[in-house]
């Protein structure tokens, strides 16, 4: 019997994506689902606006978000240090795709998240990401050829497909066509996995009311 599949969109520069990993891998271990990890590389200017446009209200929200993410991180024994600058995570996302193809996904994924949020990895530096690939048993040279060649078109196609589904942030999980955004939706996702008929029942009730 084929395992239920959950598509997970993530970005290494999202603290909420970082702290969601533990519970998502537990779904795979405990509920027998298959996780399909894909990059949704956030475009910071589009997601947050330019620095000049950011108001005091915006910065209060940012400070709260990091405080909130650290609470989740502390409960897991993880470290979250605020990024030193704005990052383009393309190379790290390309590394995710490369690592999956070479059977290195989990060590790569865990290493990149841990080192980036410990301020020990520049995820927009191809040499830094190549070093992670090499450290988990991959070929740095093959990765660099991929990252500087076909990776961009593949990465952009994945982003376009995600947005066609309605994805706008990370972590976003997609199960049976239904989107769940944020680590605080994992409980609801778990309910859907355990009782997939609940969606059809709820939709049927709504249509009858309409």
Image (cartoon, rainbow, N blue to C red):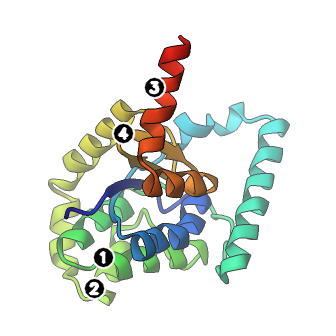
What residue did someone put label 2 on?
134
Residue name at image x 78 percent, y 45 percent: 61
Rate crowding at label 1 as few (under 14), some (14 to 19) or many (20 or more) other CA atoms within 10 Å: many
Rate crowding at label 3 as few (under 14), some (14 to 19) or many (20 or more) other CA atoms within 10 Å: few
Tally of numbered discs: 4
**Contact, mark 2 vs mark 1 (Cβ under 8 Å):** yes
Measured in 3D between alpha carbons, the distance from the residue under mark 2 to the one under mark 1, in whole angstroms, is 6 Å
What residue did someone put label 3 on?
204
Measured in 3D between alpha carbons, the distance from the residue under mark 2 to the one under mark 3, in whole angstroms, is 51 Å
Disc nearest the viewer among 1 and 4: 4
Disc nearest the viewer among 3 and 1: 3
Measured in 3D between alpha carbons, the distance from the residue under mark 2 to the one under mark 4, in whole angstroms, is 36 Å
Residue 130 — which label?
1
Sequence-first disc among 1 and 4: 1
**Contact, mark 2 vs mark 3 (Cβ under 8 Å):** no
Disc nearest the viewer among 4 and 3: 3
Q: Secondary structure at mark 3?
A: helix
Q: Secondary structure at mark 1?
A: helix
Sequence-first disc among 4 and 3: 4
Residue name at image x 42 percent, y 69 percent: 31
What residue did someone put label 4 on?
177
Measured in 3D between alpha carbons, the distance from the residue under mark 1 to the one under mark 4, in whole angstroms, is 34 Å
Sequence-first disc among 3 and 1: 1
Left or right placement of residue 130 versus residue 203 in this view: left
């Amino acid at each position: 019997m084929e395992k239920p599949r959950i598509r997970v969109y993530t970005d290494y520069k999202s603290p909420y994506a970082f702290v969601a990993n533990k519970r998502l891998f537990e779904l795979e271990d405990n509920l027998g689902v298959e996780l399909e990890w894909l990059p949704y590389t956030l475009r910071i200017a589009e997601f947050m606006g330019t620095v000049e446009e950011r108001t005091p209200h915006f910065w209060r929200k940012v400070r709260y978000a990091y405080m909130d993410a650290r609470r989740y991180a502390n409960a897991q024994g993880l470290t979250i240090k605020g990024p030193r600058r704005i990052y383009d995570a393309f190379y790290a996302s390309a590394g995710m795709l490369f690592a999956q193809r070479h059977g290195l996904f989990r060590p790569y994924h865990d290493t990149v998240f841990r080192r980036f949020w410990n301020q020990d990895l520049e995820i927009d530096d191809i040499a830094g990401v190549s070093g992670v690939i090499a450290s988990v048993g991959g070929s740095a040279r093959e990765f660099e050829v991929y990252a500087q060649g076909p990776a961009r078109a593949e990465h952009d196609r994945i982003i376009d497909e995600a947005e066609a589904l309605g994805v706008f942030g990370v972590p976003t999980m997609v199960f049976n066509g239904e989107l769940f955004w944020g680590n605080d939706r994992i409980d609801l996702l778990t309910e859907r996995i355990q009782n997939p008929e609940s969606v059809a029942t709820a939709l049927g009730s709504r249509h009858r009311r309409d």
